Amino acid sequence: MSTPALFVAALAAASGVVHAEPSTEDLSFLLGEWTVERVHQPGSENERRSEGSLACARAIEEASIRCEYYFERTNAGPIRDVAYFNYNGVYDAYESIWLSATWPVKNTMAAPAFGAPTTLIWESTFLIEGGVREWVRTAWSGDGDASFSRRVDIRTSRDPKGAWRHWMTETATRIAGE
């Protein structure tokens, strides 16, 4: 079992959460409208902050949840990201696919399907420019109702093995429910 999977299992065990059979419905806490603050490269001299919105609704005959992020930028056009979330019973994992107007890579992520769905570790790897491989680890946590946060850590095949960088923190606060 991977370290992130053990982390999620430990959190679930410590919280005493009893989890029924996993399903896409477990991710329904995302449904609704949110204000979002993103901080890229937090604590660095290159720190960037942006505020925007997130709207999530059921999609594809309710088999998925579609979330759309929108951010204005002062130095360029707006940022629009779309993500689809679901539970995949074949792999016993929550999955997401991320599409962005500002990043050409289509990112598919998976998180083990145990523990509280508001405390998940999503992982992905893909090739970026120049044949460089990038690993992404995203940790979600929240109360599943009024707010959640997302921490994104990255490393590349150019970095020393195991050298993760805190790339972004995102905080979402609910405006309206489903």
Image (cartoon, rainbow, N blue to C red):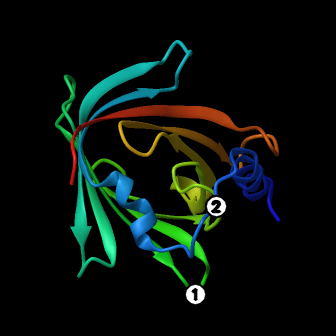
Label 1 or label 2, whichever comes before in sequence order: 2
Quadrant where the N terminus is found in the figure: bottom right
Which residue does the numbered mark 1 point to in the structure image? 90
The residue positioned farthest toward the top in the image shown? 45
Q: Nearer the viewer, residue 155 or 69?
A: 69
**Residue plotted at (65% across, 64% down):** 114
**Residue plotted at (52% across, 68% down):** 94
Separation of residues labelled 1 and 2 (CA atoms): 22 Å
Q: Nearer the viewer, residue 134 or 87?
A: 87
Q: Position of residue 127 (x, y in %)?
A: 57, 61
Q: Give the amino acid at mark 1.
A: Val
Q: Position of residue 104 (x, y in %)?
A: 37, 57
Q: Nearer the viewer, residue 172 or 145?
A: 145
Q: Nearer the viewer, residue 84 or 26?
A: 26
Q: Is residue 24 above or below residue 159?
A: below
Of marks 1 and 2, the one in the foreground: 2
Q: Disc 1, disc 2: CB below 8 Å?
A: no
* Marker count (numbered): 2
Which residue does the numbered mark 2 point to in the structure image? 18
Residue at disc 1, secondary structure: loop
- Determine if residue 60 is in view: yes
**Residue plotted at (80% across, 60% down):** 2
- The image quarter in which residue 51 lies: top left
Tag shown at residue 124: none
Q: Position of residue 162 (x, y in %)?
A: 80, 43
Q: Is residue 155 above or below residue 111?
A: above
Residue at disc 2, secondary structure: loop
Q: Give the amino acid at mark 2.
A: Val
